Image (cartoon, helix red, strand yellow):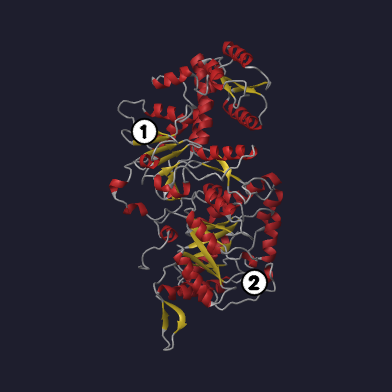
Amino acid sequence: MSTTDPVSRLERALAATAGHFVVTAEIGPPKGINIDPVIAEARHSLSQGVTAVNVTDIQTAVMRAGSLVGCKLLIDVGIEPVLQMVTRDRNRLALQSDLLSAYILGVRNVLALTGDHVAMGDHPEAKIVYDLDSVGLLAAMTNLEAGHDLGRDLKGKPNELDGAPAFFKGCCVTPCAQEVEPQVIKLAKKVAAGAQFVQTQAVYDPAAFESFMKLVEKYGIKVPILVGIVLLKNAGMAKYMNKSVPGVSVPEPIIQRLSDAAKADRQKVAVDIAAELVAAMKPMCQGAHLMTLGWDHCVPQIVAQAGITVAPPAAAAATTKPAERAAIQLSDFAKDSGMGARLIDGEPLAQEMQQKIAVEAAELTAKGRKPRLVAVQVGENPASKIYTNMQAKNCESVGIEYQLLNLPAEMMQEELLARLAELGADHAVTGIILQMPLPPQINARTVQAAIDWRKDVEGLHPANLGRLLLSNEIVAPCTAKAAVELLKRTCPDLAGKETVVVGHSEIVGKPVAALLLQSLNASPTVTVCHVATKDLAAHTRRAEVLIVATGVSQARWLGYQRRRKAGEAVSRPDLSPIIKADMLREGAIVIDVAINRIPRGLDGAGEPLKNAKGKPDLVTVGDVDFQGALSKVAAITPVPGGVGPVTVAMLLANTLACAKALA
């Protein structure tokens, strides 16, 4: 392999066009064997705007699982790792052996470190090795790339390798040390030994970092530098770092902000501080290394708040034959993720819609016709309570009056039908929504059909579904409208595009197909599949546009729980996405509608793994292998954050539409 060609996505990203910014993150293997939650959290939270993820190597000298296994598991879920390797615990034999093993397992990025002293950890009696320092480790990697190790044969010649690896080699530096110039001099030695990129220790003083970067320039060091930021969870942590971590200095104003923050606001304040620091220092360097210490879910927020335009990964798709790619022209609506595919973020569209709805609702109110939505709930349900609270808040934000009608769980169907008839006759009520689930004595379809179709804000009344088929709808099912609107914003020209819808429910699949087929000349070519479709992959692989809404992972998990509760012998469910990466067409647009709330993993007894609070550790995922899709498709909706926010806005839009039609 030519070492002049980029060997990793990180190397390609750092070599990308000027003006882009690279973000890396970090995870730590567990003290034990339960690594599934760590990998699952990385897969869930470190996918938006993160080019690669470091895996720490016995961090702070606390014994735990090794970095190499973490790297391999990240590779397995489609995340590019950076192997951290410390010289403290292994001699040159073990270090070189581990490097070869890492390469064989697919690791290409390696960060050479000396490692924290064992006195800091939980085995202070451990013997220190330090056969090589970080400079020596970098030299060892360079030797391996040249095809030989550090040893010599009987003739004094280097030992030859049977095949040589190629790494993207990194090192660390402390920009805010009391004596900065010695740090820069040592950095120059590391670069001379082969370092190709730098991740710094934590920096909280942009002025000090600017001085460091000027000194780097003075010494002629020309490798990309990623400024390190450790997320400060509270004031105590900041004070501890000032006291105990050499070369790290958290300014007093930052400590004061953390001290003043209420407990409930600490995470937001921590994210704000990190984003402000990154924004201040990004003009000075090529990237940021975010160390969140378990708060991985904060990384996308930091990236967004810092206004980062992340560097695109390698153009792997450029090697694909044009005939194999979907010929899709994207608008600017979908944003660069830094991971290949663009992200179709629903939040901006939802906010745009809500602003417009608020204006129109105010105009309607001024004319004496205030929109009023009545939510009908039969019986108590904790999940419904959360949903109705959200409905009330959302309606209030746009000037729609909201009323929750609580009815007893023992109410019979005839009584409910009578109440719905009363609401239909009430001229002050412009919208009705029926909360699910309903008690077993009530048939949902029967009562849904009894709602005055002109006030059916969900668009599920037979009359509204019929009008949708005739392209004469006033309202349509909210989630279906949200999915189609996001698609049209992403790709305005859908004419003739091969479009596959997976899922055929009345709420999403069927109305999505109807909405897409409303134009004679501008409609795509639509195929509707479902979970029982034979050779589903044959359909999805030809799809230029793929819309998926099955919720099959959620259904399997709920079915598994029910059968276990009933005492049945049941095998572990397959909770993997129904749409795997190899089922996707290169360059496709993917709208992932599903919201599956499932465990990160199951323990030996078949129960969900527990989080730090001892509760089931659940994640929210879609129907598509998101990580695998990022390097293959042109654009994709994240879950959560894609279709969901727009669905909420569509309910408000439908409520307004009903009120306007009745005015």
Please name the amino acid that badge 1 sits on: Thr
> How many marks do you count on the picture?
2
Q: How far apart are marks 1 and 2 (CA)?
A: 61 Å
Q: Which mark is residue 117?
A: 2
- Dividing the picture into quadrants, the one containing residue 442 is top right
Q: Where is residue 644 in the image (x, y as percent from the top left)?
A: 52, 35
Secondary-structure class at tag 1:
strand
Which residue in the protein does label 1 denote?
A: 527
Nearer the camera: disc 1 or disc 2: 1
Residue at the farthest bottom position: 155
Location of residue 383 with respect to 303 vertically, above or below: above
Where in the figure is residue 295, as x and y percent of width and height?
61, 51
Asked whether 25 or 88 is in front, the reply is 88
Q: How crowded is mark 1: few (under 14 residues within 10 Å), some or many (20 or more)?
A: some
Give the residue at x 36% y 44%.
585
Residue toward you, 561 or 593? 561
Secondary structure beneath dot 2 equals: loop
Name the quadrant of the N terminus.
bottom left
